[in-house]
Amino acid sequence: MAAAMDHAGLAVLTFEECLELVAASGVGRLAFLADGEIEILPVNYTVDGSAVAFRTATGFKLEAAVERAVVAFEVDAYDEIERTGWSVLIKGRAEVVSEPDVVRRLESSGLRPYAAVPKPEWVVIHPNTITGRRIPAAG
């Protein structure tokens, strides 16, 4: 069965394809509102079901999670030689993880922050929508 195409000729990814691509990657961009400005910051993450989880410390990302802010999370890849690629966009709410069982499960994922600064807090993005597109191979 051929993939559905959008108005720009990009293949529309299924929910399952989106989750597979996000799970296979490890770095994405978190977008949220902070002090009246849009912030977009890279984070390394793990996938927990259909949710994305990452570690953070005191700062804008943690403040957004404490406020259960609406956020967007984007992961993509592009092959310049083949001129193919994909993008997945997750929209939802960020939340600080406080339940001990969930923290243990996330800790067992093995995710370690790239930054040398300790990142003691876990944040999870509960998705409202997960959508994706793929640039099809030429020909």
Image (cartoon, rainbow, N blue to C red):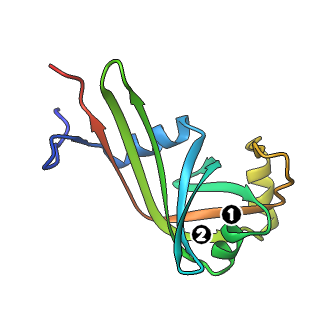
Vertical relation: 118 (above or below) 25: below
Left/right placement of residue 61 relative to residue 37 reads right
Which residue is disc 2 drawn over? 94
| Label 2 neighbour load within 10 Å: few <14, some 14-19, many 20+ | many
Q: Are marks 2 and 1 in contact (CB under 8 Å)?
A: yes
Residue 63 visible (yes or no): yes
Image quadrant for the N terminus?
top left
Three-letter code for the amino acid on which mark 1 is drawn:
Val
**Image quarter for residue 82?**
top left
Mark 2 vs mark 1: which is more N-terminal?
Answer: 2
Q: How many marks?
A: 2
Q: Residue at x 20, y 37 (%)?
A: 3
Callout 2 secondary element = strand
Left/right placement of residue 31 relative to residue 128 reads right
Three-letter code for the amino acid on which mark 2 is drawn:
Ala
**Image quarter for residue 53?**
bottom right
Vertical relation: 13 (above or below) 106: above
Q: Residue at x 78, y 43 (%)?
A: 112
Which residue is disc 1 drawn over? 123
Measure how far apart labels 2 and 1 are at the Cα level. Answer: 7 Å
Closest to the observer, 45 or 57: 57
Callout 1 secondary element = strand
Vertical relation: 39 (above or below) 138: below
Residue 50 placement (x, y as % from top left): 51, 54
Q: Residue at x 55, y 37 (%)?
A: 25
